[in-house]
Amino acid sequence: MRKRQPPTIFNQARMQQLMDKEGIDLLILRGNENSSYVSEFFNNGGQLAYRPFTVFYFRDPAIESAYVVPAVDLHLAMDSTWISDVRAYAMAEFFTDLDTHFYPDFFEAAKAVLSDRKVKGLVIGTEGETLPAGYKAKLDHLLEGNRIVDASPIVELCRMVKTPEEIRRLRRATEITIKAHASFRDAIKVGGTDRDLFKAATGRMISEGADGIRFINIGCGPKNSFAAHAPFPMGTVMQRGDFVKVDMGAICLGYNADFVRSYFLGETSAKHQEIWKRLNDAQLELGMGLRPGMTGGEMFERGYSLISKHLPKFPREFIGHGVGIGSHEQPRMNEVNRTVLEGPAVICIEYSYYHEGCRHHTEDTFLVTEAGVENWTENCPRELIVKA
């Protein structure tokens, strides 16, 4: 077995502090993002609901963590995670290149992990009602004799504060996305299609070294100028005066960017240009004014006041969010969120507004630390009109 390295993504010290504060002895994390975060194994199989990848993480450092995975992914998991005790249950394959015991199902493996560690009378944190109902019912039964609490909030708080390796990956994903956006913008031309835009952006992401494409939503022409999340190209041929928008993010080792710009091809009205200027001015002022200690609600109120005095009936219920393994992480900037921003955190600020069938949308990415704010996307062009 290879020598285990300490975690570089999972903020272990912070998780210990949060578990101490809440009195949680054991975390059992099955959600794909959370289990990937703690284990540092980025798998594809966890998207299948019947194949749980589950971490057992103890507050007491003297009690060894464990990781239960499907047999088909055991070898890769063992080579990828910092956790030494990795166990498998029969799923997809009954035997592999490893000569080792496979449990008949996940719950038999979980039962063995808990029995080996004599888990009883503990406070155990799970992901609460977000767990699949059948899994939750069986897990609750398995954990009888312990007190079960919802640990989702503390895991979100842990993930908000980024380690240096997380920041490196997020910065790289953002750099790649900005370059892809430059190719997207260059492809906006009369007679071109939204599929040309898609190819230009995704091709540039891969050529620049992206490990994948988290998403790309293109609005192009009157068929979907109003759409926030158009799922695929429609073959629209661009004409002079068309509205064009893209919301996209490249992936770097499991971490994704999230970035938006909007355009008009050749010409547009003074009102559209005014809206675009107002959105960008408010976004930049809010983003560069972020400080640790602000709550999600306070950030929303400040951002809303910056824009609502210029644009009536501003439609958004949130104006920003953290980004990391997940596309939307804490602090989510809405009116009711009292989560306190702690740094270093990577934050996306986004504004949108509807006018004459078009959904103006802009989004930038900021690194927030105790020392100040960096705008990672400040050098991407903001000109609304692309020459025809």
Image (cartoon, helix red, strand yellow):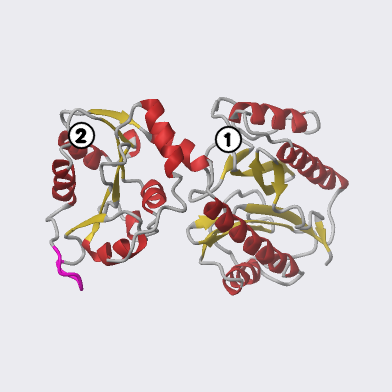
Identify the residue at image location x=64%, y=37%: 319
Decide which of 134, 118 is in the foreground and name it. Answer: 118
Would you say residue 100 is visible in this rendering?
yes
Residue 46, percent across and down? 33, 55
Residue 128, above or below 214: above
Decide which of 66, 150 is in the foreground and name it. Answer: 66
| Callout 2 secondary element | helix
Q: Is residue 326 magenta?
A: no
Indicate the quadrant where residue 356 lies.
top right
- The numbered mark, 1 or 2, whose residue comes first in the sequence reads 2
| Callout 1 secondary element | loop
Identify the residue at image location x=15%, y=65%: 100
Main SS, magenta residues = loop
Would you say 351 lies left or right of 276 here? left
Decide which of 352, 99 is in the foreground and name it. Answer: 99
Kindly identify which residue carries mark 1.
342
Q: Which mark is residue 140?
A: 2
Magenta span of residues: 94-100
Identify the residue at image location x=63%, y=71%: 204
Inspect the image, locate mark 2, and give the three-letter code of the amino acid beneath it.
Answer: Asp
